[in-house]
Amino acid sequence: MAIDAVILRELQLIVPNLHRRYSGVTATNRMVAPKLAKLFRAAWFGSDAPEDVARLSIPDLLKLWRRRAPLIWHARRNNEMIVGALLKALGWPLKLVFTSAAQRHHSWITRWLISRMDAVIATSDVSASYLKREATVIPHGVDTDRYAPSVDRAAAFAEAGLPGRAAIGCFGRVRAQKGTDVFVDAMCRVLPRYPDFCALIVGAITADQAAFANDLKTRIETAGLRSRVIITGELPIEELPRWYRRLTIYAFTSRNEGFGLTLLEAMSSGAALVASRAGAAELVVEDGVTGVLTAPGSVDALVTALEPLLDDPDSAASMGAQARARVIAQFSLDAEATRIGDVYRALV
């Protein structure tokens, strides 16, 4: 949606996305931006703009120089902080906000850029603990209408033509950081004993991870599970909710993570969750109630957590229902947008 003169004149918020490759940061940004656009006059600057948010072009941005009314520039990456700080120094009336999801010590340049921000948001208490300044903790949210359970999960599964009667899923880029190898090794152990289940690996395989992915395929072949462990590759984001609805169990296997949005997407879709203690898992998951927490990188721990759910699909369904209820109550997009809006209002 192109920006018009009225929106440009009354603009309150610029949402930059200065990254060529689609990523988890882009996904979280795209989801909350339309909600923020209902609270503020907003425009998206960069690639992968959501359809229902106005797009700010470079000529439009230039027109905002020396405008008197303040504008929020909400960065989520270093390059976006750099551009925001530079524009502000050159006369653009920007109030700079940065969201940090990283659970690690920042480089000196990131620390310096963060010090230039007017406000900082952290997605968890752990992320906030690595910042050298005050931050407002606002967890990511998820669109609970878009990521919703199927009325008939068995029918949704059958529609895909997958083997068996139920699925265990692991979504995200195929790489060691995401623990895709942990998932594959666990599937090689449990699937022979649970013939009703198949496994789905949904996510991009980048060129630098081709050898890693080929090794996983070899392990699957050696275990005789080629037809029951399906690697889809990257799928259009519009198709992901349909694939979540086909899952009985979701395995979040990351070794380290900033937040881990797939946690919320799977829970909102009503899948039972087994999650490594990475990213926001300990914030989001009530261990033993809305999911089961495991040690990162441990195949044994993942298998041990999966087996009771594989043995008792009714228990898995109950856990999935409680997981969705928790997301609706505490991790909706509306709640995230409202709290971000409070940060904006304090600045302008």
Image (tube, grey):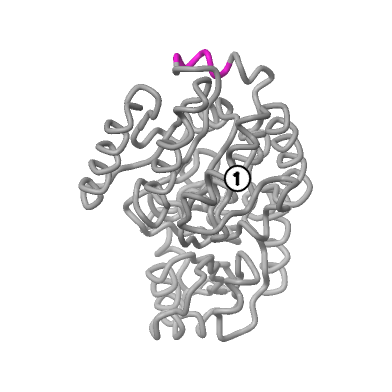
Q: Residue at x 47, y 40 (%)?
A: 170
Relative to 336, does residue 150 appear above or below in the rendering?
A: above
Image side of residue 37 versus residue 194, left or right: right
Residue underneath mark 1: 305
Front in this rendered view, residue 68 or 153: 153
Q: Residue at x 59, y 39 (%)?
A: 266
Please state the horizontal and vertical placement of residue 111, each as a whole percent of the image.
46, 83
Front in this rendered view, residue 43 or 96: 96
Q: Amino acid at mark 1?
A: Ala
**Magenta part mainly helix, strand or loop?**
helix
Q: Residue at x 60, y 59 (%)?
A: 280
Relative to 116, does residue 23 appear above or below in the rendering?
A: above
Please state the horizontal and vertical placement of residue 212, each as a whole percent of the image.
26, 48
**Image quadrant where one finds the C terminus:** bottom right
- Label 1's element? helix
Q: Residue at x 38, y 83 (%)?
A: 109
Please state the horizontal and vertical placement of residue 160, each as a whole percent of the image.
47, 17
Q: Residues within 10 Å of mark 1 (few under 14, many from 20)?
A: many
Which segment is the magenta one?
A: 156-161
Please state the horizontal and vertical placement of residue 259, each as a whole percent of the image.
55, 59
Q: Residue furthest front?
A: 193
Image side of residue 290 versus residue 31, left or right: right
